[in-house]
């Protein structure tokens, strides 16, 4: 399965010590150069060490710079989101991991299958890689910049049978 990731899924999972879920779920993750730079350039983000050392994370350059610029200008996405979407199109990715609302909207409109951090946690629970989602969501909310509405929080708990 070809999976591309934007920055936020990486940083949030790394912040709570669960970045390994991506390898368990997808085996290999591709990130565009801009996401690599967001993760490794000052100030270093959660996941910096991992993205530099884990063999299952591969950095790819985006060829279609016009698409990247178009996404930045018309959709007002940042460089990492724009490159992640452009790379997903370029290499016919089967899944794009992205959390930002505008980026998700653009990816959907372009026919890219998406999921975000919460979708990763739900899949990890369903596949038996984690025993519960609630403690991880609570940890994300408490320790990182992750935000989730109360209704979505409750919806996720209902999906995984933890409500």
Image (cartoon, helix red, strand yellow):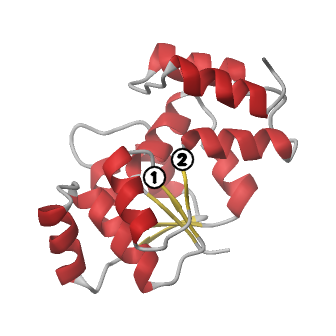
Q: Closer to the camera, 17 or 144?
A: 144
The residue wearing badge 1 is 98
Q: Residues within 10 Å of mark 1 (few under 14, many from 20)?
A: many
Q: Which class describes the residues within 10 Å of circle 2: few (<14), some (14-19), or many (20+)?
A: some
Outermost residue toward the right in this view: 128
Q: Residue at x 56, y 42 (%)?
A: 117
Q: Name the residue under label 2.
A: 116
Q: Where is residue 52 in the image (x, y as percent from the top left)?
A: 44, 56
- In this rendered view, identify the residue nearer to me: 89 or 59: 89
Q: Where is residue 95 in the image (x, y as percent from the top left)?
A: 58, 66
Q: Distance between the residues labelled 2 and 1?
A: 5 Å
Q: Which of 132 and 17 is in front in this view?
A: 132
Height in image: 5 above or below 10?
below
Question: Which quadrant, please, contains the N terminus?
Answer: bottom right
Identify the element where label 1 is drawn.
loop
Residue drawn at x 69%, y 62% is 26
Q: Is residue 147 left or right of residue 1?
A: left
Q: Is mark 2 on a helix, strand or loop?
A: loop
Question: Quick check: can you spot residue 29?
Answer: yes
> As drawn, which residue projects farthest toward the left?
73
Where is residue 151 shown, x and y percent of the image? 56, 22
Q: Which residue is drawn at 64% across and 36% down?
A: 18
Quarter location, residue 49 = top left
Q: Do the residues labelled 2 and 1 touch (CB within 8 Å)?
A: yes
């Amino acid at each position: 399965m070809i999976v591309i990731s934007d920055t936020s899924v990486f940083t949030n999972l790394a912040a709570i010590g669960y970045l390994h879920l991506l390898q368990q779920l997808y085996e290999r993750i591709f990130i565009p150069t801009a996401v690599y730079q967001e993760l490794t350039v000052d100030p270093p983000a959660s996941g910096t060490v991992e993205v530099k050392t884990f063999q299952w994370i591969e950095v790819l350059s985006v060829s279609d710079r016009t698409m990247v610029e178009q996404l930045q200008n018309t959709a007002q996405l940042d460089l990492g989101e724009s490159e992640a979407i452009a790379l997903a199109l370029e290499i016919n990715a089967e899944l794009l991991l992205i959390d930002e609302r505008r980026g998700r909207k653009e990816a959907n409109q372009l026919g890219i299958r998406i999921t975000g951090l919460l979708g990763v946690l739900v899949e990890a629970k369903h596949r038996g890689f984690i025993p519960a989602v609630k403690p991880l969501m609570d940890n994300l909310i408490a320790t990182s910049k992750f935000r989730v509405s109360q209704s979505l929080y409750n919806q996720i708990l209902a999906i995984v049978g933890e409500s």
